[in-house]
Amino acid sequence: MSDPLLVRVTPEPLSSEEVLAFVVHPGAGASCLFVGTVRDRSDAGDVTGLRYEAWDELAETRLREIAGELFERWPVLRVAVVHRTGDLSVGEASVVIACSAPHRADAFDACRHGIERLKHDVPIWKREALVGGDAHWVIGS
């Protein structure tokens, strides 16, 4: 079987269907998919969109390290982690993570761990654009 890992940081729109299809495996009894989307409100107010910037090379390295943790800690069969950069509108997907495993609990736990680690340890930053015209960088979200 081909490489069990898909990692990508891209300015192109993300496809949850592509990510979910990637993690399909004949030994998997479960696949878990997480899709993070741009919402219309934050603590700062009404949001019109987000801009994501990344240190692409280091971000992909860190995403591979996180995926390695998933393979070590859970019996996952395939993992996909893709993150968008650039300007995104409300409702667009900013991150998609999927894991497949023989059992659902492992797929859920690995997927949850993946997004939590990504948010803390990957050099991807977001700037919120607010309805009033203000914009600010969001730290540690």
Image: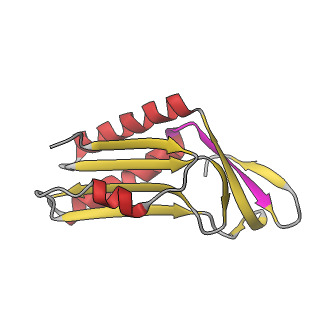
Which percent across, then down, holds residue 138?
A: 70, 50
Residue drawn at the location 41% of the way across and 62% of the way down: 16
Which percent across, then down, holds residue 89?
A: 67, 63
Q: Is residue 137 left or right of residue 74?
A: right
* Colour logic: secondary structure
Which percent across, then down, holds residue 46?
A: 77, 70
Residue lying at the far left in this picture: please name it: 27
Residue drawn at the location 61% of the way across and 52% of the way down: 141
Q: Which residues are magenta?
A: 121-129
Residue drawn at the location 60% of the way across and 69% of the way down: 91
Q: Is residue 4 above or below residue 99?
A: above
- Residue 41 within the segment the image draws in magenta: no
- Residue 128 within the segment the image draws in magenta: yes
Residue drawn at the location 58% of the way across and 64% of the way down: 92
Q: Relative to the observer, which residue lies in front, 80 or 137?
A: 80
Q: Main secondary structure of the magenta part?
A: strand
* Number of numbered labels in the structure image: 0
Residue lying at the far front in this picture: please name it: 12
Q: Quadrant of the N terminus?
A: top left
Quadrant in which residue 45 is drawn? bottom right
Quadrant in which residue 34 is drawn? bottom left
Quadrant in which residue 128 is drawn? bottom right
Q: Is residue 12 left or right of residue 131?
A: left
Q: Is residue 82 left or right of residue 54?
A: left
Q: Is residue 73 above or below residue 104?
A: above
Which percent across, then down, holds residue 27?
A: 11, 57
Q: Is residue 112 left or right of residue 68?
A: right
